[in-house]
């Protein structure tokens, strides 16, 4: 429950109150409700025994609940495509939904006030006898309660959640440096990685590449990149279909003796991934490299780096490649070249550092269900309030 409220607190803190979009959504929603009401009234001619005041309130109710359904649909669809990871507009949308659900409650409260001996004449034909008055009261109360069936409309918006059934498959590729120089930071990384993977959705394929004790003896970047077909040299690469398998695999990783051929390991990961996913199409793709960058098996004498290969860069784009640095901030050729290629580098000395970095990198790969729960809570609470409003008893 604490996490549920903390989630809403994050919407509050991240909301961009100074932007046009934040206020345009709730104000625009109210304007659309008003516009729908005005336009709808122009096409309504048959009113039976109900007078204009009652009809106007009914149209307000239907229009606002229709807009609420649209807002719920927008929230659900944007949630499915995970746009909120880059655009924190959750609070603005929830506020818009609250206002849309508030309008029918106000309308029901206004209609309720007409259920008096004098007010009943404002919403229906004036009764001339006590018998007619009794019939009118029964009729208008039924009409009042029939309006509540329109509270079904907002729930139609949740049908947009069905898009999650076709949200596509993501590829998460991880290269983890497990040579002795990583020390205790390696185990911190394992713990954070295991926790992060456990929170992922099920529509992800995961490839994990670690270092083995074998070495190819290649000492130059050109020699490494001349290899075009995957054959295990210095690495152990594995394709994993479920997060449970990934968690078990991560738990089994251990430090390996030997030097740190990080460049060749990344290249091997690229070759393995390209071969293992040859017939797959991925909606999102990310490469995470967890290392201290202290390459001691290959040289950088040519001044080139991985991104100098057009094929590699087309497969793993620079903007979707991240390096989590085990070591204290320092200058080394690997990190310098990675920065020049446009790879984002994050600190990873403690479990908290790793967890933060991984959450930042994989935020677009995880759907936060709490937003949907908050949407449901708002709709259900406002619906209950609307339903329990009853017309006054007329003496």
Image (tube, rainbow, N blue to C red):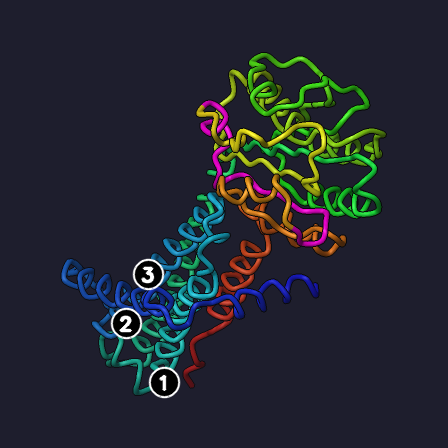
Q: Of callouts 3 and 1, which one flags the residue occurring earlier in the amino acid sequence?
A: 3
Query: Marks 3 and 1: which is nearer the front?
Result: 3
Is 315 left, or right, of 176 in this rendering?
left
Quadrant position of the C terminus in the picture: bottom left
Query: Marks 3 and 2: which is nearer the front?
Result: 3
- Crowding at dot 3, Cα within 10 Å, few <14 / some 14-19 / many 20+, comes out as many
367 and 269: which one is in front? 269
Looking at the rendered structure, which numbered label has been put on residue 116?
Answer: 1
- Crowding at dot 1, Cα within 10 Å, few <14 / some 14-19 / many 20+, comes out as some
* Magenta stretch, residue numbers: 311-330
Instruction: Tell me the residue that label 3 is attached to.
Output: 62
Q: Are marks 2 and 1 in contact (CB under 8 Å)?
A: no
In the rendered image, the vertical position of residue 390 relative to residue 374, given as above or below: below
Is 345 left, or right, of 140 in this rendering?
right
Question: Which residue appears at 82% of the width and 23% of the height?
Answer: 213
Q: Of callouts 2 and 1, which one flags the residue occurring earlier in the amino acid sequence?
A: 2
Q: Of callouts 3 and 2, which one flags the residue occurring earlier in the amino acid sequence?
A: 2
> Percent from the top left, x then y, of residue 166?
48, 32
In the rendered image, the vertical position of residue 336 relative to residue 171, given as above or below: below
Looking at the rendered structure, which numbered label has been put on residue 365?
Answer: none
> Percent from the top left, x then y, of residue 37?
23, 65
Secondary structure beneath disc 1?
Answer: loop
Question: Which residue appears at 71% of the width and 53% of the height?
Answer: 328
> Percent from the top left, x then y, of residue 159?
45, 44
Cα–Cα span, label 3 and label 1: 24 Å
Can residue 177 be seen in the rendering of this structure?
A: yes
Question: Which residue appears at 37% of the width and 60% of the height?
Answer: 65
214 and 106: which one is in front? 214
Is 286 left, or right, of 206 in this rendering?
left
Instruction: Tell me the residue that label 2 is attached to.
Output: 54
């Amino acid at each position: 429950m604490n996490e549920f409220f903390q989630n809403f607190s994050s919407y509050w803190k991240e909301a961009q109150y100074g932007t046009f979009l934040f206020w345009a959504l709730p104000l625009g929603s109210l304007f659309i409700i008003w516009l729908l009401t005005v336009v709808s009234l122009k096409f309504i001619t048959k009113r039976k025994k109900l007078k204009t005041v009652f009809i106007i309130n009914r149209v307000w109710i239907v229009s606002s609940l229709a807009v609420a359904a649209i807002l719920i649909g927008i929230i659900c669809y944007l949630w499915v495509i995970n746009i909120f990871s880059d655009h924190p507009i959750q609070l603005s949308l929830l506020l818009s939904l609250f206002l849309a659900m508030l309008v029918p409650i106000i309308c029901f409260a206004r209609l309720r006030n007409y259920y008096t001996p004098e007010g009943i004449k404002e919403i229906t034909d004036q009764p001339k006898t006590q018998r007619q008055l009794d019939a009118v009261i029964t009729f208008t109360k039924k009409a009042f309660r029939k309006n509540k069936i329109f509270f079904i409309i907002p729930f139609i918006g949740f049908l947009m959640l069905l898009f999650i059934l076709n949200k596509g498959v993501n590829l998460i590729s991880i290269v983890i440096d497990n040579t002795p120089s990583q020390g205790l930071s390696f185990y911190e990384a394992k713990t954070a990685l295991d926790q992060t993977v456990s929170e992922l959705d099920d529509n992800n394929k995961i490839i994990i590449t670690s270092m083995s004790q074998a070495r190819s003896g290649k000492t130059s970047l050109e020699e490494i990149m001349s290899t075009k077909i995957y054959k295990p040299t210095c690495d152990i690469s594995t394709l994993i279909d479920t997060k449970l398998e990934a968690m078990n695999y991560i738990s089994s990783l251990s430090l390996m003796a030997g030097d740190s051929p990080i460049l060749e390991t990344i290249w091997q990961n690229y070759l393995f991934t390209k071969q293992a996913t040859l017939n797959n199409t991925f909606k999102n793709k990310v490469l995470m490299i967890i290392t201290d960058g202290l390459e001691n098996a290959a040289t950088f004498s040519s001044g080139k780096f991985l991104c100098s290969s057009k094929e590699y860069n087309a497969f793993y784009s620079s903007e979707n490649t991240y390096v989590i640095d085990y070591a204290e901030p320092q200058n080394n050729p690997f990190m310098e070249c990675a920065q020049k290629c446009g790879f984002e580098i994050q600190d990873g000395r403690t479990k908290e550092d790793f967890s933060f970095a991984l959450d930042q990198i994989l935020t677009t790969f995880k759907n936060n269900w709490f937003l949907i729960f908050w949407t449901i809570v708002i709709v259900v609470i406002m619906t209950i309030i609307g339903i329990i409003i009853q017309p006054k008893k007329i003496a």
